[in-house]
Amino acid sequence: MSSPIPEHPSSGARAGWQHAVRALRHRAYRRFFLAQSASLIGTWVQLVGVSWLVWRLTHDAAWLGWTGFAAQIPILLIAPFAGVWSDRFDRRRLLLVTQALSLLQSLGLALLVLTGTVEAWHCLVLAGLLGCINAFDTPVRQSFTVAMVADRADLPSAIALNSFMFNLARLLGPSVAGFLISAFGEAACFLLNGASYLGVLSVLATLRLPPPPRRAASGSVVTALLEGARFAWHHALIGPLLFQLMLVSALIAPYVQLMPIFAGQVFGGDARTLGLLIGAAGAGAVGATVMLATRPGIHGLPRVIGRGGLLAGLGLAGFAQSTVLPLSMTLMVAVGFGIISTAASVNTLIQSRVPDDKRGRIMSLYTISFLGLSPLGSLTLGHLSAAFGAPRVLAVAGLLCALGSLRFLLRASALTRTLVQTGAQKELD
């Protein structure tokens, strides 16, 4: 039986900090953490670069929505099958392929810009290509964490650190992108991102891990996929967690695609203003991961999830009506804090309860819930914004999320009891 995940809080800030970083004592995880941190900064630099490039070429909110849709809709369609393959094949080799393909995509985008041949449809197609790659990469990478952390008791620390590095990149990346676009143009963003994949490829190629257990490929891919979906749907804890994450993803996360409108039209700024707004959300997200990483117990996380969705919804509604940049940045901090306190808490609770033989499939459902529904939201909110204005549309989306999160918050006590019961059963198993 594996070591149980600690579930009862200890006192003291020092104990909380030690809990937060304990996963770094595993050499394989530490190397991957450092390389992936640099790569994620490059990813956010490219994300802002593409968004600004599309806005510069079209000045059309619908194009922004379509670009976001193309980048993330493959996750909704492909990630479930990637989860099945993640449960059947060597995850390290799968990641080597996805990271190499991502490198080539970045270089192709940079070449189009440097040669002056780039058009908006190029951005759309290449965003779709990267979305297909990420649809394989994300659930595999989420599941691969377990292989690098030998002691299962350190898994919550690793999940929190994964979220921390993602959101630190989210904080730093937009600011770096704003500088690069102003000084050198969008191509510099894409070249930097391409270079950032080299470190991850080097680490993955040289990692020395125990051979993965042989996983019997029983039944077809579709059968295995349906088995994982039924498990999640009927699980008393995982099902409600995924539904709440879907709510936040569909209504709040698409704000990123519409930020150029606020930076350019509402505040009369440029790419640096865009970097400030997205960076402010990143600062809130980093704060959320620090808060979660220093929590030694997981029993209070259902309430954290409900409060996070409520904060994100109200923050976005307020941001949509603000015309004062410092106030808007403050509200973006709240939005970023709310989104990530929800997503990271859901990740932690699911990883603590899912069986290893279904981990890839359930994490693919997590990926769909967090990232896969966002393109539908980007497309819908982009077109609604073109018709009714981005401020009005984001305000309504934020209020709807707040109402749904309030309902979840009222169920938090019952979910906490379920969390305790499933934890006791897992330890017996």
Image (cartoon, grey):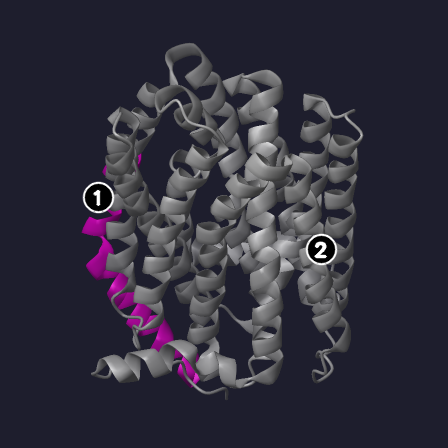
Q: Nearer the viewer, residue 281 or 9?
A: 281
Q: Residue at x 77, y 67 (%)?
A: 93
Name of the residue lying farthest toward the top = 387
| The magenta segment | 401-429
- How much space separates mark 1 and mark 2, taking CA atoms? 43 Å
Local SS, label 2: helix
Quarter assignment of residue 57? top right
Residues tagged 1 and 2 counted as in contact (Cβ below 8 A): no
Q: Percent x, y for residue 224?
A: 66, 57
Task: Using the image, determine if residue 364 lies above or below residue 248.
Answer: below
Local SS, label 1: helix
Task: Using the image, determine if residue 23 lies above or below residue 344.
Answer: below
List the residue tagged with mark 1.
Answer: 406
Q: Percent x, y for residue 48?
A: 54, 38
Residue 227 falls left or right of residue 240: right
Residue 236 falls left or right of residue 151: left
Name of the residue lying farthest toward the front = 183
Task: Using the image, determine if residue 398 lies above or below residue 300.
Answer: above
List the residue tagged with mark 2.
Answer: 195
Dot 2: within a 10 Å radius of its alpha carbon, few (fewer than 14), some, or many (20 or more) residues? some
Task: Using the image, determine if residue 242 lies above or below residue 413.
Answer: above
